[in-house]
Image: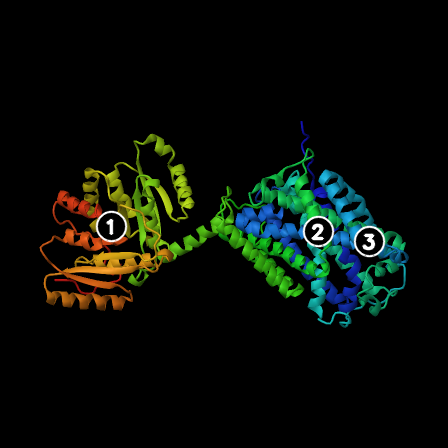
C-alpha cells in the first residue's frame, strides 16, 4: 500500500521557499548598484513601492486562499476557480513555462558564480564547460524534487541559515568599519535611463513570494498556511531590503562610484561582510540553488493541475508512490535542459519576468472581481477592498511596461491568443467561478436598465420561444430559429412536461442540461428550459404569454407543424388565443433539410393584410445575414385582381423595400381561375424557404388545416407567419396595405 504523501505546514511549505526566492541573486548582485545610482532615499522609495505592489498581491492571494480550499497548482488553481478555466489556462500555461525556464536561469547563474572563483582554470576547461555544469545542476534539482519534495524543502533550511548568516555578516562588517553620514542623493552614473530603469532592474527581487503558493497541493492547511506564510515572507523580505541599503549608504569602505559599478556584483558583499567570500559565496550559491528548487517544485505542479483540469494530457497528473508528479517533473527538467542551448538568456529573462508579472495582474483582478460582484459564496477571512486589488493590478502592468515594452505587448498578446483559443474549445468546468457571477452581475444591470426603457421599433429583434416535444427530431427547425436570432436575437427552446410525468419531473434539470449538450454538438446556441404545467395546451398559452424578463420579453412563439390532425387543430386554436397576447406566431414545417448550394432562394407571399409582410421580410433579411445565406435572393410574391392593381402594388412594394433598404425581386401575379394555394405551390417549388401569412381566424379550423397541409406537403420548407406585435413593436415596412 502506498504511503500518503507528506503534507507541509506554514514554515516549511510556504515561508521558507518564499523568503529564499525573495532573498536571491538581485540582493547580492544589484543592491550596491541601486544605492550607487539613486542614493538612499530613492532606494527606500523603490523598495517601498516594489514591496507595496507585492504586499497588495499577497493580500489578494490571501483573500482568495481563505475563501476556497486551494488545490494543486497554486496560483493557476486560484485564478481558474475565480476567473474561469479559460482565464486560468491562459495564465497557467505561460506561468508553467516561466517557472521551467527559470530553473535554467538559476542553474546557469549558479554555474557562472562557481566558475568565476577559479579564473585560472578557465583556459584549461572546455568551451562548453558552463553549459555542461548548468545541465548537471538541472539534472540534480530535477532528481531531488522528483524523488521527494520533503527532502528538497528540508534542504532549504541550512540554505536559509547561510543566507541569514551572510546578512548578519554584512551588518557586523559595516558597523565595525568606518561609517559616515548616509548617501542621501546620487547621480545616475551607470543607469542612463534614470529612476524607473533602476526600479525595473530591482523589482524582480521582490517577486518570489508566490513560490510557497505553488506548493498549495502539498500543504496541510492551505487556507491557513498561504496567507500567513506569504505575507510573513513579503514583510520580512521588505524589512531586510530596507536595512541593506541603509548599511550600504553609511559605509566608508566603498566609494559611490565603486557601488555604482554594474560589474561589481557580489564583490561589494565580500568586501563589506566579515569572513567575506567564506560566507557570502556559499550564501549566493545557496540562494540561487534554492530558487531553482522552488521553480522545479512549483512548475510541475502547475502542469499537474492543468492535466487534472483537462488542459494537458492526463498522464502528466500521475503521481509516484511518494506523491510526487514525477513525469511532469522530468518533462520540466528536459525543457529546462533544452533551454540551455537557446543562448541569449538575458534577453529571454526579461520576457519571462514580464510573463510572470501577468500572474500579479491576474491574482489582483481575481480578488477585485470577487469583491465587486458580491457572490454570496465569497466569504474570505481576509477582506481586501476591490480598489486596492485593482491598484495592485494596474501597478504590476506599469512595472511590466517599465521592464520591457515589447515584452509587455508580447505577454498580453500571447495570453490573449491562449484565452481566445481556450474559449473556442467550449471547455466544461464543474465549479462556480466568478465568470458566471460577472455575467450575472452584468445581466442584472442590463435587465434593470432595460426595464426602465421603452423599446423602440428600431431596436426590435426576434426574442423567440420554440416549443418542442423532443430535440433531435426537430433539429432543422432549431437551426432555422437559431439563424433568426444568432446575430441580434435570442432563442429559447422550451419543453413542457405535466405534473403527471413523474419520471420526467424528477429529471427536469437534467433534461435541460442534456438539451444543451445536444445543441453544443451541433454548434448551436440557445437557452433551454423545461416548464412544468398542468395541461399542455393551456401550458403553452401560459408560458408563451408570460415568457421573458424585463426588457427581454419574448415576442415570437414558434411551433413545428403537428403530425396528427388533432394536434394541427390544437395548434391553430392556440394561435388564435395568442393573438391577443401581442406575440408573433410562426408555424414551420420541413420536408427536406437545407442544401449546401450558395444560391438559395427565399419566397415571401404577401397579401397586403395584417402586417404579416413586415414580419416576413424582416425574418428573411435576418436569415440572409448568416454566412451560408448571404447570397440568397428574396422574392416577394403578391396577387392582383387587375393590371391596374398590379401596377400600383408593384410601385408600392418597390417603394417599401427601397425605404427599408432591403433588396428583393418583386412578382405581382394576376389572379386567375387557380386557387391561391395552387398558385403559391406552382411558383415556389424551387424555393428553399417559403414565408406565408397566417390569417387571423378565417374559416373553420378543419378547413384552414386542410389548406396548410396541402402547402406544407408540396414545398421544401414553409413558415406560416402571423404578426401580432403590439403597436410600434415591429418596424413598418409596407406602409400601405392592399384594399
Q: Marks 1 and 3: CB-CB under 8 Å?
A: no
Q: Is 702 above or below relative to 235?
A: above
Name which of mark 2 and mark 1 comes first in the sequence. 2
Q: Is residue 318 visible?
A: yes
Q: Quadrant of residue 297?
A: top right
Residue 522 in the image: state x and y as whole percent.
40, 46
- 408 displayed left or right of 280: left
Residue in the image at 75% along x and 72% along y = 188
Foreground: 477 or 540? 477
Task: Provide the secondary structure element on which disc 1 rests.
Answer: strand
Task: Provide the secondary structure element on which disc 2 rests.
Answer: helix
Foreground: 152 or 45? 152
Pick the quarter of the image with the C terminus: bottom left
Name which of mark 3 and mark 2 comes first in the sequence. 3
- 29 displayed left or right of 497: right
Q: Disc 1 versus disc 3: distance between alpha carbons?
A: 79 Å
Q: Disc 3 versus disc 2: distance between alpha carbons?
A: 16 Å
- 356 displayed left or right of 637: right
Task: Provide the secondary structure element on which disc 3 rests.
Answer: helix
Q: Which residue is mark 1?
A: 718
Mark number, residue 129: 3
Q: Which residue is mark 2?
A: 338
- 644 displayed left or right of 473: left
Q: Quadrant of residue 25?
A: bottom right
Pick the quarter of the image with the N terminus: top right
**Residue situated furthest top in the rendering:** 1
Amino acid at each position: 500500500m502506498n504511503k500518503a504523501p507528506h503534507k507541509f505546514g506554514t514554515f516549511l511549505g510556504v515561508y521558507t521557499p518564499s523568503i529564499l526566492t525573495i532573498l536571491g541573486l538581485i540582493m547580492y548582485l544589484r543592491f550596491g548598484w541601486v544605492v550607487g545610482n539613486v542614493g538612499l532615499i530613492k532606494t527606500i522609495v523603490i523598495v517601498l513601492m516594489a514591496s507595496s505592489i507585492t504586499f497588495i498581491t499577497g493580500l489578494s492571494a490571501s483573500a482568495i486562499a481563505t475563501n476556497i480550499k486551494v488545490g494543486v497548482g497554486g496560483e493557476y488553481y486560484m485564478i481558474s476557480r475565480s476567473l474561469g478555466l479559460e482565464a486560468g489556462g491562459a495564465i497557467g500555461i505561460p506561468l508553467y513555462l516561466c517557472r521551467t525556464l527559470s530553473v535554467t536561469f538559476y542553474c546557469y547563474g549558479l554555474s557562472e558564480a562557481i566558475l568565476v572563483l577559479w579564473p585560472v582554470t578557465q583556459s584549461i576547461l572546455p568551451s562548453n564547460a558552463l553549459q555542461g555544469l548548468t545541465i548537471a545542476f538541472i539534472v540534480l534539482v530535477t532528481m531531488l524534487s522528483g524523488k521527494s519534495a520533503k527532502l528538497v524543502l528540508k534542504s532549504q533550511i541550512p540554505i536559509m541559515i547561510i543566507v541569514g548568516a551572510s546578512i548578519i555578516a554584512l551588518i557586523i562588517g559595516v558597523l565595525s568599519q568606518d561609517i559616515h553620514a548616509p548617501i542621501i542623493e546620487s547621480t545616475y552614473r551607470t543607469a542612463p535611463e534614470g529612476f524607473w530603469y533602476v526600479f525595473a532592474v530591482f523589482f524582480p527581487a521582490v517577486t518570489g513570494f508566490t513560490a510557497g503558493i505553488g506548493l498549495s497541493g502539498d500543504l496541510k492547511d492551505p487556507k491557513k498556511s498561504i496567507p500567513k506564510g506569504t505575507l510573513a515572507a513579503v514583510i520580512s523580505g521588505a524589512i531586510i531590503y530596507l536595512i541593506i541599503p541603509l548599511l550600504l549608504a553609511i559605509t566608508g569602505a566603498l566609494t559611490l562610484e565603486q557601488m555604482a559599478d554594474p560589474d561589481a556584483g557580489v564583490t561589494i558583499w565580500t568586501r563589506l561582510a566579515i569572513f567575506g567570500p567564506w560566507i557570502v559565496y556559499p550564501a549566493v550559491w545557496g540562494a540561487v540553488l534554492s530558487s531553482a528548487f522552488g521553480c522545479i517544485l512549483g512548475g510541475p505542479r502547475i502542469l499537474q493541475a492543468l492535466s487534472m483540469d483537462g488542459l494537458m494530457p492526463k498522464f502528466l497528473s500521475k503521481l509516484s508512490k511518494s506523491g510526487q508528479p514525477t513525469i511532469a517533473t522530468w518533462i520540466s527538467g528536459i525543457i529546462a535542459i533544452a533551454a540551455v542551448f537557446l543562448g541569449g538568456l538575458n534577453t529571454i529573462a526579461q520576457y519571462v519576468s514580464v510573463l510572470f508579472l501577468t500572474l500579479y495582474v491576474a491574482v489582483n483582478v481575481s480578488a477585485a472581481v470577487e469583491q465587486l460582484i458580491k457572490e454570496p459564496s465569497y466569504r474570505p477571512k481576509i477582506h481586501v477592498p476591490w480598489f486596492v486589488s485593482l491598484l495592485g493590478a494596474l501597478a504590476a502592468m506599469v512595472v511590466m511596461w517599465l521592464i520591457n515594452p515589447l515584452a509587455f505587448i508580447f505577454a498580453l498578446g500571447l495570453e490573449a491568443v491562449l484565452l481566445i483559443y481556450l474559449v473556442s474549445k467550449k471547455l466544461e468546468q464543474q465549479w462556480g467561478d466568478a465568470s458566471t457571477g460577472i455575467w450575472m452581475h452584468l445581466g442584472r444591470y442590463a435587465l434593470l436598465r432595460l426595464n426602465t426603457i421603452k423599446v423602440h421599433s428600431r431596436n426590435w429583434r426576434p426574442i423567440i420561444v420554440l416549443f418542442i416535444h423532443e430535440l433531435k427530431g426537430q433539429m432543422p427547425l432549431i437551426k432555422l430559429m437559431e439563424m433568426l436570432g444568432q446575430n441580434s436575437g435570442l432563442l429559447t427552446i422550451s419543453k413542457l412536461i405535466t405534473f403527471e410525468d413523474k419520471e420526467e419531473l424528477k429529471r427536469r434539470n437534467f433534461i435541460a442540461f442534456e438539451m444543451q449538450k445536444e445543441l453544443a454538438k451541433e454548434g448551436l446556441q440557445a437557452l433551454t428550459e423545461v416548464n412544468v404545467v398542468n395541461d399542455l395546451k393551456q401550458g403553452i398559452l401560459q408560458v408563451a404569454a408570460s415568457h421573458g424578463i424585463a426588457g427581454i420579453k419574448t415576442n415570437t412563439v414558434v411551433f413545428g407543424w403537428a403530425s396528427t390532425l388533432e394536434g394541427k387543430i390544437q395548434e391553430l386554436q392556440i394561435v388564435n388565443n395568442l393573438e391577443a397576447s401581442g406575440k408573433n406566431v410562426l408555424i414551420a414545417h420541413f420536408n427536406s433539410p437545407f442544401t449546401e448550394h450558395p444560391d438559395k432562394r427565399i419566397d415571401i407571399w404577401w397579401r397586403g393584410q395584417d402586417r404579416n409582410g413586415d414580419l416576413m421580410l424582416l425574418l428573411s433579411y435576418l436569415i440572409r445575414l448568416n454566412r451560408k445565406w448571404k447570397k440568397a435572393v428574396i422574392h416577394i410574391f403578391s396577387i392582383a385582381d387587375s393590371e391596374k392593381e398590379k401596377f400600383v402594388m408593384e410601385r408600392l412594394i418597390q417603394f417599401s423595400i427601397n425605404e427599408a433598404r432591403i433588396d428583393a425581386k418583386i412578382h405581382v401575379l394576376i389572379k386567375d381561375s387557380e386557387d391561391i394555394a395552387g398558385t403559391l405551390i406552382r411558383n415556389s417549388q424551387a424555393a428553399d424557404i417559403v414565408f406565408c401569412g397566417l390569417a387571423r381566424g378565417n374559416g373553420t379550423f378543419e378547413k384552414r388545416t386542410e389548406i396548410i397541409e396541402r402547402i406544407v406537403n408540396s414545398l421544401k420548407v414553409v413558415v406560416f407567419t402571423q404578426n401580432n406585435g403590439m403597436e410600434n413593436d415591429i418596424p413598418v415596412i409596407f406602409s400601405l396595405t392592399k384594399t
